[in-house]
Amino acid sequence: MSSKKPNPYLVVLDVGHGSAAVLHDEGGTVVFDTGSNGANIKRHVAKAGVTKIEAMLLSHADKDHVGGAVTLLMDGSVAIAEVLMNSDASKDTFVFQQLRYVLAEANKHHGTKIDRRLATSTTFIRNGLGIEVLHPPDAVILAGVGSKSKTGGKLTSNSMSAAIRVSRGPKSSILLGGDIEYDCVDEWKKTKLQPSAKVLIFPHHGGLPGSPDESEAKLFGYEITKLVSPDVVVFSNHRTKHGNPRECILKAIAKAVKGIRFACTQLPQHLHPQVKATGCWSLHKSKKGAGVIEGAICLVFKTSDIEISFGEKP
């Protein structure tokens, strides 16, 4: 039997329109967002034999990112040590109210720690991997949703979304973009922060960020891709809902980084003809008589690269 330790990996689950990813490493299991419905993430955790989740990081309070958290918190077969999420007084939805109630119950009966800060000063210590919060800054957290940003705009749940980088090293890293918007990009440019990563899980599922203006969306797509400079961009998306990933976003990304490749958890039908052995959609590959490969995306942290495949395990 080999004594070699398996490489850590992150699974971007296929949850339709939403975001949910699970990290498996030497330190255990960490969850990043949970999608709208907890069925898929609960099934994945159970199949992987996970009985304890060290931390659940919820990027922001939108249903398509936190809806499934209740399912995990109520699952008696899984202990969740800590939940990190920034407070959001603007949310009065049933989903968010339910989450608050279940968190209180988990804290009371199971000792689940609730940390209301997911900001750039938040630190994690793990075996072999680093987890960094690259947005929002602590000063923005203090201001809160509904207050004004530095540029005079209103801070929203999306503009205060967390951006989180998971790294094995400078050449083996993944940036989870949550639903970050222009405020985040502006902050990175101003502070000269380098959010570089091999893989970018693109914000807003490849949709329009905060504005219906496609020209603004193209600029956002270009600038964030230029800053991160990834080899691969992943879209956690539904194949028909909202038309994601948008064509204008794809063009902006391709313009920003030459030779970049794309992958979708659900590949829209109109993109199937672009799946070839080479080119930006080559990761999906063609299956004879059965369309294209899609579904959950497994990202394995190698020493100096990220290995990408479809499925829920390496």
Image (cartoon, helix red, strand yellow):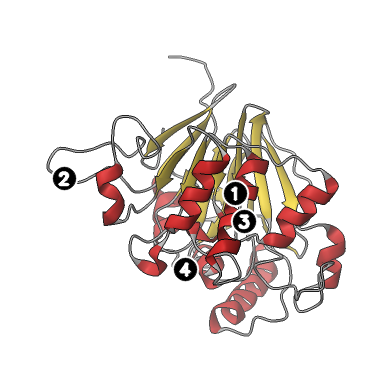
Residue 112: x and y in percent read 68, 61
Image quarter of the N terminus: top left
**Amino acid of disc 4:** Ser
C-beta proximity under 8 Å, tags 3 and 2: no
How far apart marks 3 and 2 lie (CA) works out to 35 Å
The residue under label 2 is which amino acid type?
Ala
Label 4 or label 3, whichever comes before in sequence order = 4
Is residue 296 toward the left or the right of residue 269 in the image? right
Q: Earlier in the sequence, mark 4 or mark 2?
A: 4
Question: Do tag 1 and tag 2 residues touch (Cβ < 8 Å)?
Answer: no
Residue 308: x, y in percent? 44, 33
- CA gap between label 4 and label 2 equals 28 Å
Q: Which mark is residue 36?
A: 4
Residue identifier under label 2? 290
Q: Which residue is the site of mark 3?
A: 220
- Mark 4: few, some, or many residues within 10 Å (few <14, many ≥20)? many
Which tag, 1 or 4, sits closer to the chain's start? 4
Mark 2 crowdedness (10 Å alpha carbons): few <14, some 14-19, many ≥20: few
Q: Nearer the viewer, mark 4 or mark 2?
A: 2
Callout 1 touching callout 3 (CB < 8 Å)? yes
User: Front-most of 176 and 258?
Assistant: 258
Of tags 4 and 3, the one toward the viewer is: 3
Q: Earlier in the sequence, mark 3 or mark 2?
A: 3
Mark 1 near mark 4, Cβ–Cβ under 8 Å? no
- Please tell me which residue lies in front, 232 or 71: 232
Q: Is residue 303 visible?
A: yes
